[in-house]
Image (tube, helix red, strand yellow):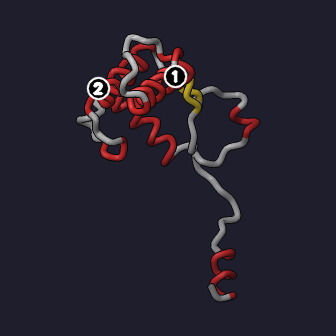
Amino acid sequence: MRTSQAINAVGSIPKAIDGPCAWRGSDLAQKSDWIVHWTSAQVAELERAADHFSGTGIALENITPESFPLQNLSSFIGGQLQELLHGRGFVMLRGLPIDKWVQRSLHTELQNNKTHSCPTCSPEKPLGALV
């Protein structure tokens, strides 16, 4: 990059940022519209879609709306995406059972490890017996 190009790039930085993406923490502290609460029905639909996708054997990078079916959540998730891209630029998601999902994922990974590393082990033995 030439020096003149660098100066032009710096000169193009806006003096002020405005619009929905311009916010101050003190303003957000007085509001809660940036906090999105997931309902138990929404979480259940997301889990059903994840279970369906897991059963397909499709690699994550090949996920499609058909392989991860969401009947009611599509518009909800689309709204959050619009807020990320054209609104405030962030949302805080509340109500997602992350601990439960991490445990389930960890169990699945350990089970897969057991299956691949010890093909002669009995499937009736508890997973913890080998870990």
In the shown orientation, is residue 73 left or right of residue 92?
left
Does residue 13 appear anywhere in the picture? yes
Tell us which disc is closer to us: 1 or 2.
2
Disc 1 from disc 2: Cα separation: 18 Å
- Rendered location of residue 6, percent (x, y): 67, 81
Q: Which residue is mark 2?
A: 52
> Of 19 and 78, which appears nearest the observer?
78
Looking at the rendering, in which quadrant would you find the N terminus? bottom right
Q: Quadrant of residue 46?
A: top left
Q: Residue at x 72, y 30 (%)?
A: 29
Few, some or many residues within 10 Å of mark 1 (<14, 14–19, 20+): some
Most extreme residue toward the right, as rendered?
26
- Rendered location of residue 37, percent (x, y): 53, 21
| N-terminal label among 1 and 2 | 2
Identified by mark 1, the residue type is Leu
Q: Which residue is mark 1?
A: 96
- Rendered location of residue 52, percent (x, y): 29, 26
* Element assignment for label 2: helix
> Of 92 and 8, which appears nearest the observer?
92
Q: Residue at x 76, y 36 (%)?
A: 26
